[in-house]
Amino acid sequence: MDWSPDEKRLFRSLKTPEKIQAFVNELVYNPTDHASSPRWVMITREGHCFEGGLFAAAALEYHGLKPLMVDLIAEADDHHVLTVYKTQTGWGSIAKSNTTLLAGRHPFYLNVRELVMSYFDFYFNTKGKHSLYGYSNPINLNHYNKWEWRTTDNDLKKMGMSFCDLTHYELISPKQLKALPPVPKKLLDACLLGSDPSGLYQA
């Protein structure tokens, strides 16, 4: 990959998933649906969940891991993506979110479903209704190289939207999801602390 010296220097400094997550956490949240490549994320220091996920995938790839994402689908809420990786201790994730509770997870989950389930209790819309109901298998971004997703100047929104066409697996039935009560107000307030209101799904 034709990374510039400055880009390589940044990637080298992000030697662990924890350091990549810390970098992603510091990105200013992008409330628009325009999706920039990791190259532009490094320039602007901005990103929403898909942009942060692409950056994390590129950073992990730089250090020899596969660039893998899992797509999460939700009812009456924004979808979300996780950049996932596997170590000797299990599956972990890196994620950018406009809320406080949907960032990365440490790598001790036995499988992808278990990792995704760790997000369920904290995945709800602005009315406090649980919304996560499905997930994809890990998506190898090398299959999307035609988009030049690592360095392109073009909008990658359509690439992200194409994930919706992939097979997703149900975590919970629509009937079960609808029957769940809203989360407590304190949890909702904690989740939305510091969020950009213009980037929140309006349920």
Image (cartoon, rainbow, N blue to C red):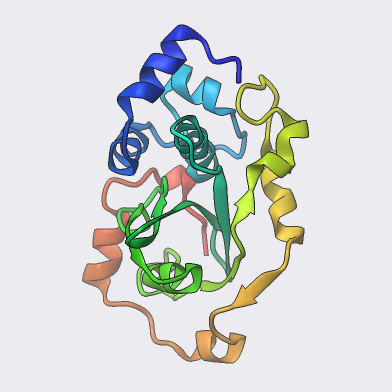
In the visual, does 172 lie left or right of 17? right
Q: Please name whichever residue, 34 or 8, is drawn nearer the observer in this view of the structure.
A: 8
Q: Please name whichever residue, 86 or 200, is drawn nearer the observer in this view of the structure.
A: 86
Q: Please name whichever residue, 62 or 29, is drawn nearer the observer in this view of the structure.
A: 62
In the visual, does 187 lie left or right of 132? left
- Above or below residue 100? Residue 157 is above
What is the x, y in percent for residue 74? 56, 68
Work out which residue is located at the far front of the displayed protein and give it: 88
Snapshot quadrant of residue 70: bottom right
The residue that appears at 24% across and 60% down in the rendered structure is 190
- Above or below residue 132? Residue 3 is above
In the visual, does 101 lie left or right of 66? left
Q: Please name whichever residue, 69 or 97, is drawn nearer the observer in this view of the structure.
A: 69
In the visual, does 197 lie left or right of 191? right
Q: How many labels does the image show?
A: 0
- Above or below residue 146? Residue 133 is below
Snapshot quadrant of residue 32: top right
What is the x, y in percent for residue 186? 21, 69
What is the x, y in percent for residue 148? 70, 27
The residue that appears at 62% across and 64% down in the rendered structure is 136
The residue that appears at 54% across and 21% down in the rendered structure is 39
Q: Quadrant of the N terminus?
A: top right
The residue that appears at 56% across and 51% down in the rendered structure is 69
What is the x, y in percent for residue 15? 32, 32
